[in-house]
Image (cartoon, helix red, strand yellow):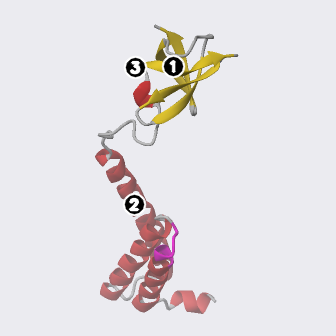
Amino acid sequence: MISYLQHLSSWDWLALGTLLLILEVFGAGGYLLWVGLAAASLGVLTYLFPALPWAWQFLLFGVLSVLTAVFWWQRQRSTTKPSDAPGLNQRGSEFLGRTFVLHEAIVGGRGKIKAGDSLWLVSGADLPAGSEVRVIGQDGVLLRVEAV
């Protein structure tokens, strides 16, 4: 094994980089991308400097893997922008503060309002159907309301 490590060529590193990048395609979630690029980069370096000792090759491989991952992490963090649709996939949050008419009376703390083309389950103090209520909160699909 040690004799194989002492005679690593640029083709060995390029093959490892290619293998890691192929595995990344099958769904590693970005973990193998940077290690694969580091291996491919080391393949280029060992092509340019064929007398590079194997210990230095592994050291450079580790350093390049960490550097590429940190570089990408920093770049991703600096380019993250706030969403232009912060309420996306949070149904019901658009109703907070709005007033509606009770579709079904609140009895025992539960009733229904009609918001848009949907009926929403609400909780609050007992009120008759037709009363105006304001949405003051949300617990999953249940809207909390109070009388206006």
CA separation, marks 1 and 2? 59 Å
Residue 39 x/y as whole percent: 43, 77
Image quarter hosting the N terminus: bottom right
Residue 147 x/y as whole percent: 51, 8
Q: Amino acid at mark 1?
A: Leu
Q: Which mark is residue 98?
A: 3
Residue at (44% x, 66% y) in the render: 65
CA separation, marks 3 and 2? 50 Å
Residue at (51% x, 70% y) in the render: 27
Instruction: Establish if 27 lies above or below 52.
Output: above
How packed mark 3 is, by other alpha carbons closer than 10 Å (few <14, some 14-19, many 20 or more), is few
Residue 115 figure quarter: top left
Is residue 49 on the magenta stretch?
no
- The first of marks 3 and 2 along the sequence is 2
Q: Residue furthest top?
A: 148
Q: Amino acid at mark 3?
A: Arg
Residue 146 x/y as whole percent: 52, 11
Residue at (33% x, 83% y) in the render: 44
Residue 36 x/y as whole percent: 44, 75
Residue 67 figure quarter: bottom left
Mark 3: which secondary structure?
loop
In the shown orientation, is residue 109 left or right of residue 120? right
CA separation, marks 1 and 3? 13 Å
Q: Which residue is mark 2?
A: 67
Q: Which mark is residue 102?
A: 1
